[in-house]
Amino acid sequence: MALRKKQKAFVEYYLQSWNATQAAKDAGYSERSAKSIGAENLTKPDIQAEIQRRLDEICMTSDEVLSSLAEIGRTSIEDIMDIDESGHLSFNFKRAKDERKLSLIKSIIPTQYGTKVELHDRMKALELIGKHHGLFTDRIDLTSGGKIIHAVGFDIDKV
């Protein structure tokens, strides 16, 4: 079933504020009924499905996150620099754009000495990928009544 005009507006406003009452008010429902209608709208399957569809459109999957981190981890300043015959370095933003590597640049700042280019943190990306793969495990020794427990990768609050 297609959403009505106010329901579509409710979804739009809800995705901006995450507040059902405010979204209902902004969508044109009465001030007096906004709280109950906002709560009711969140229980309607068609509205839930539309909210989920919209979230699926804008959210990155875990594969996308890992892919982006991998791209950052593999990036080198060489990917956007040229060296001429005299050894002079220059940034080749056209090549970076053509090779779809501009997103790997964190900032570009003109200075009195030239252009300062900062890439995203390669080591941080590699660290996050390593953690995802369980390459870096913290070991915690807990002493309890003379017994030592070795634990790897757990939430200490749940022990």
Image: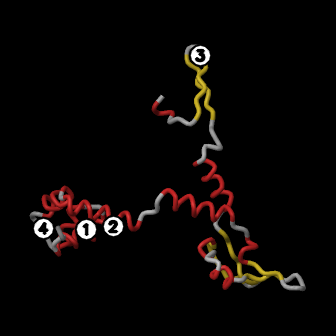
* Residue receiving disc 4: 31
* Measured Cα–Cα span from mark 1 to mark 3: 55 Å
* Measured Cα–Cα span from mark 2 to mark 3: 52 Å
> Of discs 4 and 3, which sits in the foreground?
3
49 left or right of 59 in image: left
Q: How crowded is mark 4: few (under 14 residues within 10 Å), some or many (20 or more)?
A: few
SS category of the residue bearing label 3: strand
SS category of the residue bearing label 4: loop
Q: In this view, does 60 lie above or below 128?
A: below
Q: Earlier in the sequence, mark 4 or mark 3?
A: 4
In which image quadrant can residue 5 be found?
bottom left
The residue at the point 66 percent across, 61 percent down is: 73
Q: Nearer the viewer, residue 47 or 138?
A: 47
Query: What amino acid is labelled 1 in the image?
Result: Val
The residue at the point 62 percent across, 37 percent down is: 138
Query: What amino acid is labelled 4 in the image?
Result: Glu
In which image quadrant can residue 80 be found?
bottom right
Q: Earlier in the sequence, mark 2 or mark 1?
A: 1
Outermost residue, top direction?
A: 146
Give coordinates of residue 15: x percent, y percent: 31, 66
The residue at the point 78 percent across, 81 percent down is: 82
Query: What amino acid is labelled 3 in the image?
Result: Lys
* Residue receiving disc 2: 54
Query: What amino acid is labelled 2 in the image?
Result: Arg
Outermost residue, right direction?
A: 86
Give coordinates of residue 19: x percent, y percent: 26, 61
The residue at the point 63 percent across, 73 percent down is: 105
Q: Which of marks 2 and 4 is nearer the N terminus?
A: 4
Q: Which quadrant does the N terminus fall into?
A: bottom left
* Residue receiving disc 3: 147
SS category of the residue bearing label 2: helix
In which image quadrant can residue 8 be found?
bottom left
